[in-house]
Image: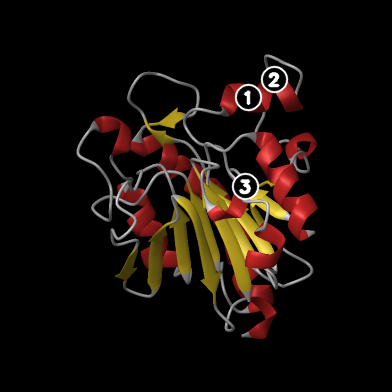
Amino acid sequence: MKILCVSDTTSSLAFSPSVAEIYKGTNLILSCGDMPLDSHDYLTTMLRKDVYYVYGNHNLKDFRKNVLKEKSNLDLSSEMTEKFYGFMLDGKCMRDKKTGLIIAGLGGSMLYSGGDSQYSEAQMKRRIWKLGYKLMRNKRKYGRYVDILITHAPPAGIGDGEDQCHKGFNCFLDFMDKYQPKYLLHGHVHLLDQNANRVTQYKNTKVINIFGSYMVDDSTLGDAK
């Protein structure tokens, strides 16, 4: 299975005029936050594949303005947010019917300035707790909790930063310990050096910083397992 992943910037090959040829054979697109919403439409149009996404720590106002027409009572778990500019996966777990891939999403960053797409460690932990029933149901029905967790922020101690904004979440480590996704894909931490390490193996999970764009090519994912 080929999964095109994007995050944080449109200055990557994923947004070149030749994207359809460069990423021919892509099965799915995942967006890990801080992407213009119309970039999802561009990728869907060019590759004719679905986009699943979470928001970052900068673009929630853009989401409100374009999707919910500046409604003041944004409910990210509401069904009305499910299919705008792709499938909004934040705080949710969904199974892609075409590939069988089980994907969960947790957007936002560590709390640093009081923004509404920022979370304390305890708040993010509660968001994970709310996913628990669905994940357990997946285990009973499909034999696994989740294939991929997409986040904006990284896990604590795995490619995160020292400043409060870019610190990772300890509860993401707990998530990987308990639910053992094959991948945790995140953005948020910008990789200015194209040769910088993107991939870290954490127990049974491969953690990848997909800043810009990154192709996951894994024939064992989803119903191909």
**Residue type beneath disc 1:** Asp
Q: Residue at x 62, y 72 (%)?
A: 2
Mark 3 or mark 1, which is nearer the start of the sequence? 3
Q: Quadrant of the C terminus?
A: bottom right
* CB contact under 8 Å: marks 2 and 1: yes
Asked if residue 92 lies left or right of residue 174, the reply is right
In the depicted view, which residue is nearer to us: 133 or 164? 164
Q: Residue at x 74, y 40 (%)?
A: 85
Instruction: Please identify the quarter of the rendering in which residue 47 is found.
Output: bottom right
Instruction: Please identify the quarter of the rendering in which residue 198 is found.
Output: bottom left
Q: Which numbered disc covers residue 65?
A: 2
Residue 82, above or below 144: above
Could you tell me residue 45's position as x and y percent? Answer: 79, 51
Give the residue pinned by disc 1.
62
Q: Residues within 10 Å of mark 2 (few under 14, many from 20)?
A: few
Whole-angstrom CA distance, mark 3 to mark 2, is: 17 Å
In the depicted view, which residue is nearer to us: 158 or 38? 38
Does residue 195 appear anywhere in the picture? yes
Could you tell me residue 197's position as x and y percent? Answer: 29, 62
